């Protein structure tokens, strides 16, 4: 896994800035104790279910970082305004977006748009019933941004699509009694799910063009290639750093 170098640049006006990959990569080590206190029960259950060595430091780092990142991005239902995750990112269906107030609600919510909005200094959108918010997305838009971050942080991850829904699979080495094996962790940032499982996909085929009605074509031609687009040009400034850190502090033990 890549080692991170975290650089905070101090501008002449006194504001700090950091790129979005370095910023999200720094949140786990900066909040390690609180993360472990908050999610220790879940970690112990996860290890017991899969015979994973719960005392292994590598296993702890893998689980707690991925689970924490998941909790940042997730919500718990596919309903407009659902925003139960730490960063309070609302879900929106396509047919209600025309009622969102704010410039750019109708553009494709690729990772650079999703993450750029998330770390903006002021909320860009508003919707009656859920107030002001910084970014939003349905299942595939969340997972593309999530996987884009994970890949930039050194993880191997894919977006999986099937039956009109999308989620993430992450392939990580973990230890079971000193034996290292590769586990597939499924993360669903729409329904707040995190567990070990690898979906058996239907037979793969060559997709000659973009086809929204074909899950395989969506994965191969759009979701996963889009998650490879550059995001490290996105800068996070002091107001967003403080806002996000406050949300984390308020919601962790």
Image (cartoon, rainbow, N blue to C red):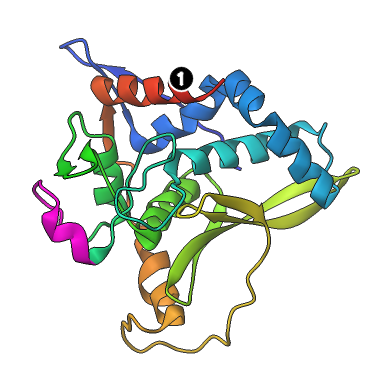
Image coordinates of residue 60 in percent, x first then y, are 71, 34
Q: Which residue is at 30% across, 48% downward?
A: 81
Report whether 223 appears left or right of 180: left
Quadrant containing the N terminus is top right
Picture quadrant of residue 237 = top left
Image coordinates of residue 152 in percent, x first then y, are 45, 46
Q: Is residue 80 above or below residue 140?
A: above
Q: Which residue is at 83% across, 31% downward?
A: 55
Picture quadrant of residue 140 = bottom left
Residue 135 appears in the figure: yes
Main SS class of the magenta portion in the image:
loop
Q: Secondary structure at mark 1?
A: helix
Image coordinates of residue 83 in percent, x first then y, are 37, 43
- Start and end of the magenta stretch? 95-107
Report whether 90 appears left or right of 129: right
Which residue extends farthest front? 129
Q: Is residue 12 above or below residue 98?
A: above
Which residue extends farthest right? 177
Instruction: Please check the rendered image and state whether residue 242 is part of the magenta-colored stretch, yes or no.
Output: no
Image coordinates of residue 144 in percent, x first then y, are 39, 57
Q: Which residue is mark 1?
A: 249
Quadrant containing the C terminus is top right
Q: Which residue is at 28% across, 30% downward?
A: 236
Report whether 91 appears left or right of 164: left
* Residue placed most toward the observer, 33 or 132: 132
Q: Which residue is at 72% across, 50% downward?
A: 173
Residue 227 appears in the figure: no
Picture quadrant of residue 206 = bottom left
């Amino acid at each position: 896994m890549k080692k991170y170098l975290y650089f905070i640049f101090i501008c002449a006006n006194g504001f700090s800035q950091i790129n979005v990959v370095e910023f999200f990569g720094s949140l786990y080590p900066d909040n390690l104790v609180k993360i472990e206190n908050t999610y220790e029960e879940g970690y112990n259950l996860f290890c017991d279910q899969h015979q994973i060595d719960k005392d292994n430091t590598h296993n702890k780092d893998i689980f707690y970082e991925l689970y924490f990142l998941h909790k940042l991005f997730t919500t718990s239902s596919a309903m407009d305004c659902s925003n139960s995750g730490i960063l309070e990112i609302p879900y929106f269906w396509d047919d209600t977006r025309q009622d969102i107030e704010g410039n750019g609600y109708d553009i494709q919510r690729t990772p650079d748009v999703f993450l750029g909005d998330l770390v903006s200094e002021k909320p860009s959108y508003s919707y009656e019933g859920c107030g002001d918010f910084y970014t939003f997305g349905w299942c595939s838009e969340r997972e593309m941004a999530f996987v884009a971050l994970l890949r930039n942080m050194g993880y191997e991850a894919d977006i999986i699509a099937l039956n009109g829904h999308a989620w993430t699979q992450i392939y990580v080495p973990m230890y079971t009694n000193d034996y290292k094996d590769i586990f597939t962790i499924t993360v669903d940032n729409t329904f707040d799910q995190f567990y070990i499982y690898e979906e058996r996909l239907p037979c793969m085929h060559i997709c000659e063009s973009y086809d929204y009605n074909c899950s395989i074509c969506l994965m191969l031609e759009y979701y996963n290639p889009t998650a490879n687009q550059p995001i490290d040009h996105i800068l996070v400034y002091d107001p967003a750093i403080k806002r996000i850190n406050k949300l984390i502090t308020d919601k962790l033990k």
